[in-house]
Image (tube, helix red, strand yellow):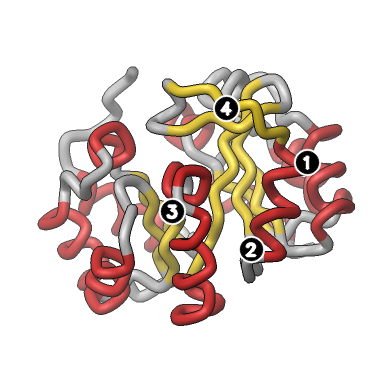
Amino acid sequence: MTQFSDDPLDVALKWQAMGASRLHIVDLDGAASGQIGNIEIIQNIASAMLIPTQLGGGLRDIETIQKILQMGIERVIIGTSAVEDPQLVAEACKRFNDYIIISIDSRDGFVSTNGWVRETHQTTVDFAQKMVKLGARRFIYTDIVRDGTLTEPNFTAIAELVHSTKAPVIAAGGISSILHLKMLKQLGVEGAIVGKALYTGDIKLKEAIAELNR
């Protein structure tokens, strides 16, 4: 783990000022524990942002999802609970529709949960198709092996997921250049989550936005 800042709100405002169209937030403590762990920080960010925000990590019941949405977070991301409690997905998608994103964290083609520490026997595509049947309308796909490595995305797996679900897919994991973003766009993804590459300077946000909008 690398710590880039001790002020998440300041960082959020920085990306907004640089032209980010959406902010992706992960409560890492919540992802590991199963309960939101940084509620005050999340609320401060949600209140300050003029751009849409989405949050994942520790969202394991309807009450928490509703509380987060009422704070001003535009979309909530369900990961572990989607695997462990499919009925929650069905209820959340029915009640909150497009405000729900299903996160698929994948290692070697199989879904992982609980902050990436537990392996399952469900393949990425099979799991995604089950979620579509339960009402899921949007996915985030993260290749765990590549996340934070500044190598390259798992283009093959991403293309397979886009093709098999016919649903909007947001790609994450291994993105380290504007070329990667262009390739993902060509594959038909709805968006991409860029994290470490922004903090290290491998991708300049303003430059990336300008290139992708050409």
Instruction: Determine the image quadrant of residue 179.
Output: top right
Circle 1: element type: helix
Real-space CA distance between mark 4 and mark 2, rounded to the nearest whole angstrom:
21 Å
- Numbered disc in front, either 4 or 2: 4
Mark 4 near mark 2, Cβ–Cβ under 8 Å? no
Residue type, numbered disc 4? Thr
Real-space CA distance between mark 4 and mark 1, rounded to the nearest whole angstrom:
19 Å
- Numbered disc in front, either 4 or 3: 4
Which residue in the structure is indicated by mark 4? 120
Real-space CA distance between mark 1 and mark 2, rounded to the nearest whole angstrom:
13 Å
Residue type, numbered disc 2? Arg
Mark 2 near mark 3, Cβ–Cβ under 8 Å? no
- Numbered disc in front, either 2 or 3: 2
Circle 3: element type: strand
Residue 8: image x %, image y %?
A: 23, 46
Which sits in the foreground, 17 or 137?
A: 137
Which sits in the foreground, 31 or 169?
A: 31
Residue 102: image x %, image y %?
A: 55, 55
Circle 4: element type: strand
Residue 187: image x %, image y %?
A: 86, 49
Decide if residue 174 is in sight here. no
Which residue in the structure is indicated by mark 3? 24
Q: How many numbered marks have been drawn onto this rendered protein structure?
A: 4
Give whichever of discs 1 and 3 has the lower sequence position. Answer: 3
Residue type, numbered disc 1? Ile
